[in-house]
Image (cartoon, grey):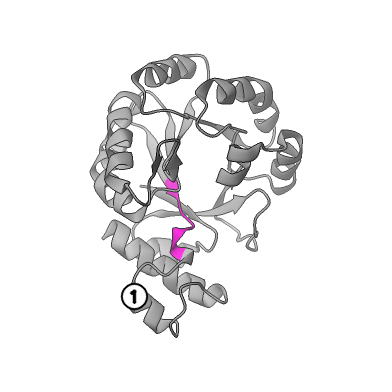
Amino acid sequence: MIVVCAPDMMPDIAAQFGVEPCRLVTFGGRASPPHMGIKVLADVGLANAKHGVDAVAYVQFVKRIRPTWAIAPDVFGDFRSTLAMWFRYSPIVAKFAAPIFVAQEFHKPRVTTATVDLMRIGARRLALPMRRHPDASCSAEPHLCAERAERALRVLCGAADHIHLLGPALRSVRILRGALKQCERQGTAVSFDTMAYRRAPNVLIKKQLGGRWQPRNGQEATVMLEAWLRQALL
């Protein structure tokens, strides 16, 4: 079963789409109230990965919320620097949550090979950046990002215990549904997260919200999340 993480995720929403619910909590962002029984993913956040995360403060954040999984501190678009951060901070993160290594530049064959080598020495949970690459916005080029992920998944699925897609565009999720199912058949757990639904995913939903693109409250956010998942998964 695919795990889907979102700030407004609840079990009843997940059940509609046959996925496992997970609450996404981003460092420095708005934290929704916890819900008993829902797994939690802590994320560094794209802006922090781009501009430099305060890794010590992030570890304290993970210690405080005790999530199921935590994205280990990473550096946007830089595999080597992220690897250095992994060796330094993942043992600390692992005291409070299962750490996930972000495979920056995963679309490069040499990086995919290096990631497989890293898995052999302990990094069994991986994340593929799917919101933005150094040379592409995945919302503007969802097919490109999905094709890159699909190539990487052919190598990584079956080798990793868990592969997570970080912030994929709706169209990328639709393209990758078959690849994720194949990953599961090979024994790798799969998940993805999204906050993209917090901007109405279509004009109909915008109309239902009185012409607004963004939600004013949790109830409207739930409507938008359901609409996003319906388009992504059905």
Residue 19 image-quadrant placement:
bottom left
Q: How many marks?
A: 1
Give the residue at x 58% y 34%: 98
Q: Is residue 165 visible?
A: no
Give the residue at x 37% y 64%: 228
Q: Please say whether residue 225 is one of the residues in the magenta stretch.
A: no
Q: Residue furthest bottom?
A: 210
The percent position of residue 68, horizontal first and vertical second, equals 58, 43
Seen from the viewer's position, the closer of residues 42 and 189 is 42
Judging from the image, what secondary structure is the residue with disc 1 in?
helix
Q: Is residue 193 visible?
A: yes
Q: Give the side of residue 210 with respect to residue 176, left or right.
A: right
Seen from the viewer's position, the closer of residues 36 and 75 is 75
Residue 56 sits above or below residue 226 on the image: above
The percent position of residue 135, horizontal first and vertical second, equals 40, 36
Seen from the viewer's position, the closer of residues 10 and 5 is 5
Q: Residues within 10 Å of mark 1 (few under 14, many from 20)?
A: few
Quadrant showing the C terminus:
bottom left
Q: Which residue is mark 1?
A: 203
Q: Residue furthest front?
A: 135
The kind of residue tagged 1 is Val
Residue extent of the magenta highlight: 192-197
Q: Give the side of residue 199 with respect to residue 145, left or right.
A: right
Residue 56 image-quadrant placement:
top right
The percent position of residue 123, horizontal first and vertical second, equals 51, 23
The percent position of residue 109, horizontal first and vertical second, equals 34, 20
